[in-house]
Image (cartoon, grey):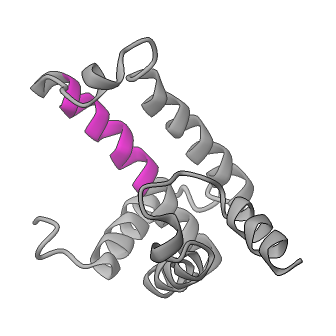
Amino acid sequence: MGDETTTLAELKTRTAEFVHERDWEQFHTPKNLSMSLAIEAAELMEHFQWVSVEESASLTSEELQKVGEELADIVLYALSMANSLGLDLSKTVLDKMAKNARKYPSEKVRGKSHKYTYYKKADDEAEN
């Protein structure tokens, strides 16, 4: 299994089966899953705390494995949350990407890192 051959539906199904086999649905509420996502994100950040930008981009194979495991935990909790809420994650992601494309038009934001409100404010000022 790999990114090229595994569908999101398969990952959601396998995640749901894993949770069901352990009778964890009772714990996998949106509240608990959202908190778990935040905790796992913090654990991912720990791997990059106190290192330079250069060091963060050149991980050893052991560091990369540990980072991958934290990222997998985040994805698993996100899949569980989608299952818990009955969300079509592919549709939700594609809809969000379309919304982001409107908020961050490439011709305005290329190479810039401002929040979308910066561009909206600039547009408003240009109109006045």
Of residue 120 and residue 74, the one placed in the foreground of this image is: 120
The residue positioned 54% from the left and 72% from the top of the image is 82
Q: In terms of secondary structure, what is the magenta stretch mainly?
A: helix
Relative to 17, say whether 115 is above or below.
above
Left or right of residue 61: residue 85: right
Residue extent of the magenta highlight: 63-75
Location of residue 93 in the rendering, given as x and y in whole percent from the top left corner: 49, 77
The residue positioned 12% from the left and 73% from the top of the image is 4
Can you tell which quarter of the image residue 73 is in? top left
The residue positioned 50% from the left and 54% from the top of the image is 112
Which residue appears farthest toward the top when viewing the image?
50
Which quadrant is home to the C terminus? bottom right
Location of residue 107 in the rendering, given as x and y in whole percent from the top left corner: 46, 76
The residue positioned 83% from the left and 74% from the top of the image is 124
Of residue 56 and residue 7, the one placed in the foreground of this image is: 56
Location of residue 29 in the rendering, given as x and y in whole percent from the top left corner: 68, 60
Can you tell which quarter of the image residue 50 is in? top left
Relative to 100, say whether 95 is above or below.
below
Which quadrant is home to the N terminus? bottom left
Relative to 95, say whether 23 is above or below.
above
Residue 69 located within the stretch drawn in magenta:
yes
Task: Report how many numbered discs are placed on residues in the image.
Answer: 0
Relative to 45, say whether 109 is above or below.
below
Which residue appears farthest toward the right when viewing the image?
128
Can you tell which quarter of the image residue 126 is in? bottom right
Location of residue 66 in the rendering, given as x and y in whole percent from the top left corner: 26, 29
Residue 44 located within the stretch drawn in magenta:
no
